[in-house]
Amino acid sequence: MLMTLWGSDIALDDTEGWQIVENHLLETARTFQTQAVTIKTNFRRFINDAELNRLVAAARDSYWHGFQHGIGIIGHGAPMAWKHGFSKLYIASSFTANDNVPCASHPDIDGNVRFTGTRVFHDQYEFDRQAKVDHICEYSGRTGRKFTLRVCWKTSGGKNCCRCEKCLRTMFELFAAGRDPRDFGFDYSNADLRKSKLNIFSKGLDYISIQGYWKPIKHELTHRPHALMPEQIKWIETCDFDKESKSRKMRAALFIHNLPARIRFKLLRIINK
């Protein structure tokens, strides 16, 4: 049974976006001949997120990513597991042991959750993101099945925007696997790919993103054929991610520093929330 939460990454008032997500869920369930269930939840809204972020600021992480989302998502499975008598619940991994990233969803946390005779499994922790994409592409090629990968958390409407860092990262990974992202729900025909580099680096990339995601993608793209990749994004082949990210952060810091004090303090207060 596939379980998806309305209220996790799709806002409760985004009914149009949720309809797209629900249709995608039902289509996926039909494809893999399984059941599907949706749960409408306010678990991200009934708490004071801004205040909790301030309380955990010393952890250098948000309350959602660093403390809430793993058990918060898993807990919704308890009534369904009890009702249907499920003995296993799987939650997809985000990182691997090599990433060494503090995260609210981790095998040591998720794997120790028990309820109603159900064990929780932090699934595919041994595979990095590129390996997962490779597995999906291999399966699609072997079976002839095409399906949408919904990864975007930056846009309303339930679709991939093909502009944000996560969409672009996934598109690059699909190119590295020798596949066309348009076959997996990334319609980039209206996205200005000339701005892809700016979109990726606009807020700077942290060390984990560079080492765990982008450098492996660059490595794959320099060792695999990628004839399908548009010319506008072949800048990745020669990109120095460390230097680029650092220079963008320095320019942003200089811009803020040169603002009038009243505006600078107000902007920093917004950024730090």
Image: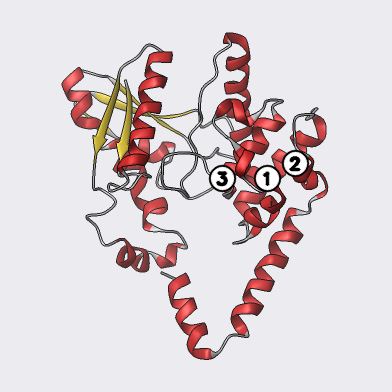
Indicate the amino acid at tag 3. Answer: Lys
- The one of 254 and 146 positioned closer to us in this rendering: 146
Pointer 3 or 1: first along the chain: 3
Q: Tell me: residue 185, above or below residue 205.
A: above
Rendering coords of residue 227 (x, y %): 80, 29
Q: Which residue is mark 3?
A: 166
Indicate the amino acid at tag 1. Answer: Trp
- At 36% from the left edge and 44% from the top edge, which residue is drawn? 10
Q: Could you tell me how far apart the alpha carbons at marks 1 and 2 are, in whole angstroms?
A: 6 Å
* Dot 1 crowding, Cα within 10 Å, few <14, some 14–19, many 20+: some
The answer to whether residue 68 is visible is: yes
Q: Tell me: residue 204, above or below residue 72.
A: below
Rendering coords of residue 93 (x, y %): 47, 35
Q: Which residue is mark 2?
A: 218
Provide the secondary structure element on which disc 1 rests. Answer: helix
Contact check, label 2 and label 3, Cβ < 8 Å: no
- The one of 168 and 104 positioned closer to us in this rendering: 168
- At 59% from the left edge and 48% from the top edge, which residue is drawn? 163
Closer mark to the observer between disc 3 and disc 1: 3
Contact check, label 3 and label 1, Cβ < 8 Å: no
* Dot 3 crowding, Cα within 10 Å, few <14, some 14–19, many 20+: some
Q: Which residue is mark 1?
A: 214
Instruction: State left or right for residue 175 relative to residue 264.
Output: right
- At 76% from the left edge and 61% from the top edge, which residue is drawn? 243
